[in-house]
Amino acid sequence: MQRTTTDPDELVESLPDRFRADVARLDAELSRVFAGHSRVAWEGVFWGGSEQRIIGYGDMVDVRPRRDPVEWFVVGLAAQQDSVSVYVNAVEDGQYLAERHAHELGGAKVGKSVISFRSLDDVDLDVLLDLAARAAAQVDPAPPPTGRVEVTDVGRDLVLERTFHAPADDVWSSLTDPERLAGWFGVLDGDLRPGATVQVRLIAEEGEPLEEINVLACDPPRSFSIDQGGWRLDVTVTRQRVRTTGVELRHHLGRDDDPGDIGPGWEFYLDRFVASRGGPPAKPFEVYLETLREHYAGQAPGAVTAPREA
C-alpha cells in the first residue's frame, strides 16, 4: 500500500451510498483534528492481502522488529464491504489506543488498532475523535512554520494560510461571529461593518488587554480589512474545492517591523482558530516564540516558504 495522487474528496464521493454520508462526516471531523497534517489517499494491498482505499491523516514511520521501517499514516479512514473502519496507529503505555479504550467506544468492533462499525450510530463519536486527537498529538511535538514574506509594490507582506474542510459560510462565521470569535481570539464589542470602530478584549494575552480595531472594509463572506493598533490586516476566505475553504491572513509589514516578532504570534492565533473548530489544541505562546522566531527573523525581503494545508 502506498500514497497516491487520488483526491480524498473524490474518494469519498465514489463510495457506495450506504457509507458515503458517514465517511464524509468522519472525514470532516478527522480533518479538523489533524489540521496542519497531511490528508492523502493510500491505495493498494493492505495487511492481510485485501485491496484497500484509505484516507490517511498525519505521517509517521512504523518501525517493526526485523523489518525495514515504513512510512505510514497516523489515522486512517476506509469503507469496507459491510462496515466503516478507522485505524488509529498510536500507543499509550505499551497498548494501542483503540484496544485500550474499546469499552468506551459503544457498539463498535475494536481490534488492536482498528475500530469498525456499520453506522456512526454504533460508535461513541466523541471518544473516537478524542483518540484521534491523542494520536495527532504524538506526532506533533512542535508547531511547524507555515508563513512566508512576500514583496509587494509597496513593501512586504507576512502571509499565513489555513485550509478547512468546511463550507465557506461556516468558516466566515468562526472569524466574525462574536460568540465564536470569543472562543479563540477575543471578546468583541461592536459590529464588523465598514467604517466602524470596535473594541476587542484579547483573551489569550497576559492581562487580557483591550484593543481598538478600525474596520476598513468588510465583504461577507469573502474578506475584511482592519487596522488593529496600527497593524493593517487583510483576511480572505476562499472556497477551494468541494467542502474545502481556504483562509489567508495578510499582515502588511511596516518598514521597521521584524517578522520574527510578528510571525510566531499569528501562528499561535491561527492554531487557536483551528482548535476552536475541533482541531488539536494550540500550544502555549512561548513554544511558538521559541521555535518559530528564527524562521521568521531569517525571512529577508522576498524570501518565500511554501504554504501548508491545514
Image (spheres, rainbow, N blue to C red):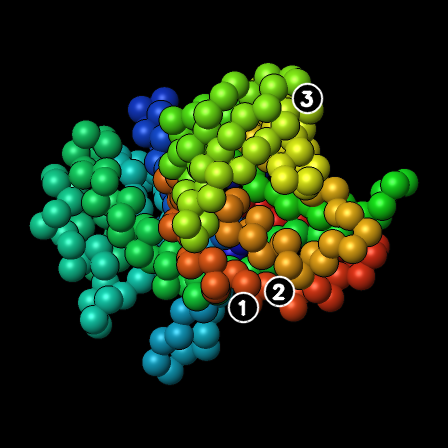
Residue at which label 2 appears: 293
The percent position of residue 227, horizontal first and vertical second, equals: 66, 33
SS label for mark 2: helix
SS label for mark 3: strand
Residue at which label 1 appears: 290
The percent position of residue 51, horizontal first and vertical second, equals: 41, 48
Residue at which label 3 appears: 217
Identify the residue at horizontal 59%, vertical 63% (top origin).
292
Identify the residue at horizontal 12%, vertical 40% (top origin).
106
Q: Is residue 161 left or right of residue 97?
A: right
Q: Quadrant of residue 23?
A: top left
Q: Is residue 306 visible?
A: no
SS label for mark 1: helix
Q: Are marks 2 and 1 in contact (CB under 8 Å)?
A: yes
The mark nearer the N terminus, 2 or 3, is 3
Identify the residue at horizontal 51%, vertical 56% (top origin).
2
Q: Amino acid at mark 2?
A: Arg
